[in-house]
């Protein structure tokens, strides 16, 4: 499906650009997008990837990943029945989902890429997405968020009376989006058109190896050292929550923001400490894991260029505006504001593009208007589906995406619909 979507975006962009006399704008958008894909996304991601893949290596060697996967085995086994319960991919996926929920995008993407690499080790057909990969992508494109920090910041900068009031509606919309994504991906994987042949001996042998691996144990005084380390961060969290600008906020918001504020420093310190207490050679293992960061960042460049340039060309040619004019009146008849349509169409395609459209929407409609609240909820309840697909599948060379695209789009549709409904109920008068 991704082949047809990409081809359609490019061909329609060229034809519409030629018909409207904007071919030069289309060309410029393509070249600017290619530059942004490499210079603004892939290369900066290399350093971040090196850090998190190094830390993940420590977590894997020390047995932390297995402990985490074992604790959540019942849920994970239902979501990913083809993945062995103690496989490192289980822990990587849990950590990625947790980072997404806390809004830690700098950590979520590298952890997600690591999870895809772990899932690829179980793939009997390299180049074709497995059911587990599609399920993981559906969850990521839905992306439950506790606090959509960027959206709240835009509302606050625009002078909203209560910019955090959309946190509850965004959480509800993202839950609906996630549920729809999971249901869709489980439904689509059973259809004959998306069927996969039975797993081969590669996956089975790998599973056996992973089941036999034993985790190392802490030194006898290690638990006390970890307790002291955790207590220090509880104190740091209390200090952060007691700041004057935090006291005025709602208790739940203060709690989640404090956790988000401390999460990355805690993980950066906890992983090496735990590994060292398990007698792992932390520096050597960190460097070994970090080596993969640059390789992964380079590998995803062609996929990023393909998706981002096609989206930029389509937008520059006026494709979003054309669709808005065509179906806007029909959506307005069912109480879907036509002003929201450009945002709803751009959100699955481009995060930066959607952020720009949302900022313009807030400026034109006012930060406290119902339309702006709906737009903020859409931003917090949905994800950039095609960017996630390009980066995650590109990191392991997946070309046949199977049912990942339709499942992701179903999640987006559910998130947008839920955003409009819940905002009408909560903010409508």
Image (tube, rainbow, N blue to C red):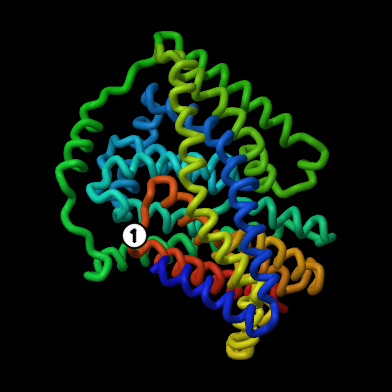
Position of residue 331 relative to residue 316, above or below, is below
Residue 367 seen in the figure? yes
Q: Residue at x 58, y 62 (%)?
A: 309
Q: Is residue 416 left or right of residue 26?
A: left
Answer few, some or many: residues within 10 Å of disc 1's Cα (few below 14, many 20 plus, some between 14 and 19): some
Of residues 83 and 245, the one drawn nearer to the viewer in this rendering: 83
Give the labeled residue for mark 1.
Answer: 400
Question: Where does the image place residue 404, in percent across and percent down from the top left?
Answer: 38, 61
Tell me the quadrant of the picture where the C terminus can be found: bottom right
Whether residue 426 is visible: no
Image quadrant in which you'd find residue 170: bottom right
In-image side of 16 versus 25 (left or right): left
Residue in the picture at 67% in, 31% down: 237
Q: Position of residue 245 (x, y in %)?
A: 81, 42
Residue 151, percent from left and from top:
69, 57
Q: How many marks?
A: 1
Query: In percent of the image, x 38 and y 23: which residue is there?
Result: 61
In the rendered image, residue 321, in percent from the top left (x then y), is placed at: 66, 79
Q: Is residue 243 left or right of residue 12?
A: right
Name the image quarter holding residue 56.
top left
Check the picture and name the quadrant holding the N terminus: bottom left
Looking at the image, which is closer to me, 206 or 226? 206
Local SS, label 1:
loop
Direction top: furthest residue: 220
Q: Residue at x 34, y 31 (%)?
A: 66
């Amino acid at each position: 499906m991704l082949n047809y979507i990409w081809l359609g975006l490019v061909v329609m962009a060229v034809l519409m650009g030629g018909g409207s006399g904007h071919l030069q704008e289309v060309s410029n958008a393509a070249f600017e997008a290619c530059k942004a894909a490499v210079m603004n996304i892939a290369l900066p991601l290399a350093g971040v990837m090196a850090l998190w893949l190094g830390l993940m290596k420590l977590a894997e060697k020390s047995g932390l990943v297995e402990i985490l996967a074992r604790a959540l085995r019942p849920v994970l086994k239902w979501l990913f029945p083809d993945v062995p319960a103690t496989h490192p991919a289980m822990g990587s996926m849990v950590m990625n989902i947790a980072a997404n929920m806390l809004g830690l995008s700098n950590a979520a993407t590298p952890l997600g890429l690591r999870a895809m690499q772990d899932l690829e080790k179980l793939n009997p057909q390299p180049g074709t997405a497995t059911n587990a990969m599609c399920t993981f992508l559906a969850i990521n494109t839905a992306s439950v968020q506790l606090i959509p920090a960027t959206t709240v910041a835009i509302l606050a900068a625009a002078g909203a009376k209560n910019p955090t009031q959309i946190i509850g509606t965004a959480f509800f919309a993202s839950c609906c989006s996630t549920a729809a994504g999971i249901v869709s991906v489980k439904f689509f994987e059973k259809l004959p058109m998306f069927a996969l042949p039975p797993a081969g001996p590669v996956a089975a042998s790998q599973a056996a190896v992973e089941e036999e691996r034993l985790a190392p144990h802490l030194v006898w005084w290690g638990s006390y050292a970890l307790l002291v380390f955790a207590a220090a961060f509880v104190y740091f969290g209390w200090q952060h929550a007691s700041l004057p600008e935090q006291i005025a906020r709602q208790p739940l918001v203060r709690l989640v923001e404090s956790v988000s504020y401390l999460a990355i420093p805690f993980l950066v310190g906890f992983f090496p400490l735990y590994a060292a207490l398990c007698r792992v050679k932390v520096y050597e293992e960190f460097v070994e894991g970090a080596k993969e960061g640059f390789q992964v960042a380079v590998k995803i460049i062609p996929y990023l260029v393909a998706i981002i340039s096609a989206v930029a060309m389509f937008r520059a040619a006026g494709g979003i505006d054309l669709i808005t004019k065509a179906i806007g009146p029909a959506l307005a008849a069912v109480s879907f504001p036509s002003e929201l349509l450009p945002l709803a169409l751009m959100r699955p395609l481009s995060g930066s593009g959607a952020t720009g459209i949302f900022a313009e929407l807030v400026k034109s409609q006012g930060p406290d208007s119902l339309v702006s609240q709906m737009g903020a909820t859409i931003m917090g309840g949905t994800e950039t589906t095609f960017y996630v697909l390009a980066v995650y599948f590109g990191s392991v060379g997946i070309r046949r995406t199977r049912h990942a695209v339709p499942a992701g789009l179903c999640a987006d549709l559910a998130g947008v619909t839920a955003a409009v409904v819940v905002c009408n109920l909560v903010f409508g008068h």
